[in-house]
Image: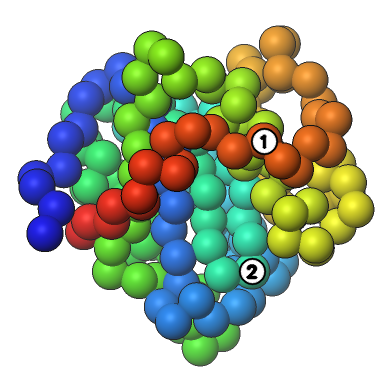
Amino acid sequence: MRRKRVSISGATYFLTLCTNHRNRGLNTPTIAASIRAETGAIEHDRHWHVRGAVIMPDHLHLLATITGSLSLSRTVARLKSKTRRELAAAGLSWQSNYFDHRLRPADHISAALTYLVTNPVRGRLVAAAKDYPQVWIGPEETTWFAWPPADDSSVRPHWLDRGQTSGG
């Protein structure tokens, strides 16, 4: 059983939210637009700053810095709640849990972003990351992150291999 989830304002988290039973369809235009709109609304409300995101057929990866008074769990709950209707219309639902990893000083944000944006290449959805419509990086990150990235789908942050833990 996972211990209580820690949420630190100013910390950057790599998040993975999956559909229930890993059912596919999350990246359809209507659902993806809903997810993107709500991640933007949460950012507009100053609860997080999205550094990068990719909507895959059965999961969502987000790299976000917590910036507001809502905890990480409550922010993720808001995202799931506000997008639930669009998912349900397609016969989908969110898993009740999600994976999170707080980036430590030794973790390189560029490796996390590269892993995130090249996920569609690893998933064989596209040949090049720049061709996948459901991926974006934050405006601040465009000043230093090479876009489009070299499609190095072998990049895998070391902390992903530590055993992914999930919690509510």
Total count of labels? 2
Quadrant of the snapshot with the C terminus: bottom left
Height in image: 27 above or below 150?
below
Q: Which x, y percent locates residue 27?
A: 66, 66
Report which residue position mark 1 lands on: 155
Q: Secondary structure at mark 1?
A: loop
Q: Answer with left or right where residue 131 lies relative to residue 74.
A: right
Q: Residue at x 79, y 36 (%)?
A: 152
Closest to the camera, between mark 1 and mark 2, is 1
Q: Which x, y percent locates residue 149?
A: 81, 30
Q: Residue at x 16, y 43 (%)?
A: 5
Q: Residue at x 37, y 42 (%)?
A: 162
Q: Amino acid at mark 1?
A: Val
Task: State whether residue 56 appears in this view.
Answer: yes
Report which residue position mark 2 lands on: 57
Q: Secondary structure at mark 2?
A: loop
CA–CA distance in space, label 1 to label 2 = 20 Å
Q: Between 125 and 141, which is closer to the camera in this rendering? A: 125
Q: Between 139 and 25, which is closer to the camera in this rendering? A: 25
Q: Amino acid at mark 2?
A: Pro
